[in-house]
Image (tube, rainbow, N blue to C red):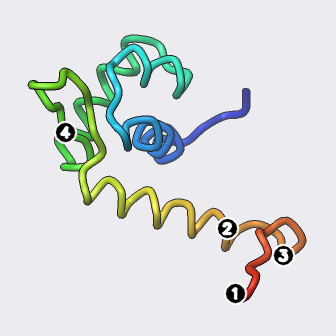
Amino acid sequence: MKYRSRMDIAADMLEVAQGGAIKTKIMYKAFLSFPQLKEYLELLEGGGLLDYVAEEKVYRATERGKRFLKMYKEIGQTLLPAGLRKKKTSA
């Protein structure tokens, strides 16, 4: 696996947690060790990007987290070479 930045990892975690996810699901889907998971959960919760919903026992991306994820994806598309970008079709 290629090197991932902290933003890449945060985006992976937020992607998994959009619909609600338990720690184990986030850890496996984002390819993290348990110590990494704990560190990033603390970071994302502290930044207001991720919330723990105690009643459901899941983590969910907040609205702020969803905005971060949207901007992260847009920047990624902007940085891709023109030939690799998704082509937008007019409806």
Label 2 with label 4: CB-CB less than 8 Å? no
Q: For the point 67% across and 67% down, which residue is it?
A: 77
Label 2 with label 3: CB-CB less than 8 Å? no
Reading the image, the residue beneath label 2 is: 77
**Whole-percent x and y of residue 10?**
43, 41
Pointer 1 local density, CA inside 10 Å: few below 14, some 14–19, many at least 20: few
Sequence-wise first label, 1 or 3:
3
Q: Quadrant of the C terminus?
A: bottom right
**Whole-percent x and y of residue 7?**
47, 47
Label 4 with label 1: CB-CB less than 8 Å? no
Report the residue that reaches farthest toward the bottom: 90
**Whole-percent x and y of residue 64?**
26, 59
Mark 4 belongs to which amino acid? Asp
- Nearer to us of marks 4 and 1 is 1
- Decide: is 66 above or below 79: above
Instruction: Identify the element where label 2 is drawn.
Output: helix
- Nearer to us of marks 2 and 4 is 4
Q: CA distance from mark 1 to mark 2?
A: 21 Å
Q: CA distance from mark 4 to mark 3?
A: 36 Å
Reading the image, the residue beneath label 1 is: 91
Give residue 82's mark: 3
Res. 69 image quadrant: bottom left
